[in-house]
Image (tube, rainbow, N blue to C red):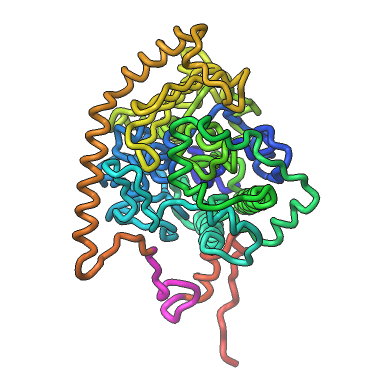
């Protein structure tokens, strides 16, 4: 056993654009993900977990800060997170943890650590203000970085891509972190975030994973694109934002895109297995809590839409699994939860076995700890998840509230939406105008009004967009100095160097430690 401390080690495996709707443990029978399914069956699976904002950086900012994006300012994929904003990495360091990040977190600005003591890769996306939307010109596409349909039209097999290169590094560096921690003398517990870009588009997967689905009957979307005039207002804006009508798609192209996506889910599943195997090799498996999740999902052709930016289930509903068989019995939790619940949950996990009291919240938190639900205690739980959207594809604040069987969506430019997900899991029937549900709609309207001032939020978002766009324009004139993270690497301290005691270094770098080497004193004959 490599128990350096009574506190739990924590491994967070975060994926990008992985919808809960495309995993076997959430009811999908086509995707091959045995490692994810195993921790789901042996751990605590949250059946009704949502992204706090269905876009990369906003979802991750909510995940890191425990705050909704309207509070922390994580509006879009070029949103600035101040260095003074506390994240769960800060809290865990206050509680004695060594915190590592391998992979993507989409931080924007000069602080690329935000509480992590070590970061072993750069990010895959830019750290500057180049991707700021413009709500004053919301109908205008920004072709430099907006999604388009190339990912679907070009779906298939690739030996290597930008994303595969990145995730190969993320996974191997995360494995190395576990090895380095196991053989180090550091007594602090470990929190490692291994954050992968897959199965995010482009939908290109290695032949190994493509071939896994050779005998699988890949289904078409459950809900086809509605006829002209029947798509709801937000979906129509997303059609324009991703350029759906710029191409014609065949059924085979849709199937190929889904097949490649599923292949990349299997690729991520393989990395999860390798990380678990490494924990086991290093005697850390029983004392490590694993959390598996994603920043948001992917529409995968449902309603004719692709990628994210939607509150529909395929885009907004995420996997969330907490796995620690020595601490929690297998359980499926029905209560609605969201990314903002992760910070208080991690603080509670870290508090078990800690010598000192857990720190009080530095800033107000919008989430609650999920540990009571992990133990089956539902008493007093809100059973509510909130998601906000303040980026491209809209010109006004959008809000989703999931409570009990209902999902409510509001935006001042659109008609309200209300779906009964128990009776209508595909979200085909909007009940907002149904007299039989007028009380439900009124209740949700009141909750939305209590949650935020729509006009004030819109004004704050536009002002912030304008400021960042102006700053970015200035910084592109003359010498450009980026904020992209440069991992520290000192070749003079790697492997074997002449200033090191060779035998001592070889022993120190080995796990488990070898038997002591005690040669007899050398005497010249």
At x 44%, y 60%, the residue is 121
Farthest residue toward the right?
215
At x 39%, y 37%, the residue is 62
| Left or right for 68, reference 37 | left
220 magenta-colored? no
Magenta span dominant secondary structure? loop
Q: Position of residue 91 (x, y in %)?
A: 35, 38
Residue 224: name its quadrant. top right
At x 59%, y 71%, the residue is 518
**Foreground pick, 435 / 19:** 435
492 magenta-colored? yes
Is residue 435 in sight in this rendering?
Answer: yes
Q: Which residues are magenta?
A: 487-500
| Left or right for 181, reference 209 | left
**Quick check: 215 above or below 456?**
below
| Left or right for 484, reference 279 | left
Is residue 366 in sight in this rendering?
Answer: no
Q: Position of residue 435 (x, y in %)?
A: 49, 7
Location of the C terminus (image quadrant): bottom right
Farthest residue toward the front?
228
| Left or right for 455, reference 397 | left
Q: Position of residue 362 (x, y in %)?
A: 28, 32
Residue 29: name its quadrant. top right
**Foreground pick, 166 / 474:** 474
Q: Position of residue 367 (x, y in %)?
A: 40, 27
**Quick check: 486 above or below 289?**
below
**Foreground pick, 412 / 183:** 412
Task: Give the number of callouts.
Answer: 0
């Amino acid at each position: 056993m490599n128990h350096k401390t009574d506190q739990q080690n924590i491994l967070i495996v975060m994926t990008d654009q992985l919808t809960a709707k495309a995993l076997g443990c959430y009811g999908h029978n086509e995707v091959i993900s045995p490692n994810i399914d195993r921790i789901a069956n042996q751990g605590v699976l949250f059946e009704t977990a949502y992204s706090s904002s269905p876009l990369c950086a906003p979802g991750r900012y909510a995940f890191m800060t425990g705050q909704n994006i309207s509070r922390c300012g994580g509006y879009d994929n070029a949103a600035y997170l101040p260095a003074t904003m506390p994240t769960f990495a800060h809290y865990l360091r206050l509680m004695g943890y060594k915190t590592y990040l391998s992979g993507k977190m989409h931080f924007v600005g000069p602080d690329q650590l935000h509480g992590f003591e070590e970061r072993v890769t750069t990010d895959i996306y830019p750290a500057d203000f180049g991707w700021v939307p413009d709500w004053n010109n919301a109908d205008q596409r920004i072709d430099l970085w907006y999604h388009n349909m190339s990912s679907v039209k070009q779906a298939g097999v690739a030996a290597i891509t930008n994303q595969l290169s990145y995730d190969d590094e993320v996974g191997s560096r995360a494995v190395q972190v576990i090895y380095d921690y196991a053989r180090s003398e550091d007594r602090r517990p470990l929190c490692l975030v291994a954050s992968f870009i897959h199965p995010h588009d482009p939908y290109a997967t290695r032949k190994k994973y493509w071939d896994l689905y050779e005998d699988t009957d890949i289904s078409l979307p459950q809900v086809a694109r509605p006829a002209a005039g029947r798509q709801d207002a937000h979906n129509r804006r997303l059609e324009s934002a991703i350029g759906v009508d710029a191409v014609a798609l065949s059924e085979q192209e849709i199937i190929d895109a889904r097949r490649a996506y599923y292949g990349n889910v299997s690729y991520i599943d393989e990395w999860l297995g390798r990380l678990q195997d490494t924990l086991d090799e290093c005697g850390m498996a029983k004392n490590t809590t694993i959390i598996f999740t994603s920043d948001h999902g992917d529409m995968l052709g449902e309603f004719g839409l692709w990628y994210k930016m939607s509150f529909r289930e395929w885009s907004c509903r995420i996997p969330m699994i907490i796995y620690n068989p020595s601490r929690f019995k297998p359980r499926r939790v029905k209560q609605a939860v969201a990314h903002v619940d992760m910070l208080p949950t991690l603080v509670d996990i870290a508090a078990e076995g800690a010598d000192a009291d857990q720190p009080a919240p530095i800033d107000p938190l919008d989430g609650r700890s999920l540990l009571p639900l992990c133990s089956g205690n539902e008493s007093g739980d809100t059973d509510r998840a909130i998601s906000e959207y303040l980026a491209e594809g809209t010109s006004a604040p959008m809000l989703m509230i999931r409570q009990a069987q209902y999902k409510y969506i509001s935006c001042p430019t659109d008609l309200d939406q209300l779906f009964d997900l128990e009776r209508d899991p595909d979200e085909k029937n909007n009940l907002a105008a149904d007299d039989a549900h007028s009380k439900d709609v009124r209740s949700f309207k009141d909750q939305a009004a209590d949650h935020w001032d729509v006009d004030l939020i819109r004004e704050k978002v536009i002002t912030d967009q304008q400021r960042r766009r102006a700053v970015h324009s200035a910084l592109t004139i003359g010498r450009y100095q980026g904020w992209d993270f440069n991992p520290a690497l000192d070749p003079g301290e790697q492997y074997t160097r002449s200033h090191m005691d060779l035998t001592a270094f070889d022993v120190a770098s080995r796990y488990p430690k070898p038997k002591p080497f005690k040669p007899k004193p050398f005497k010249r004959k």
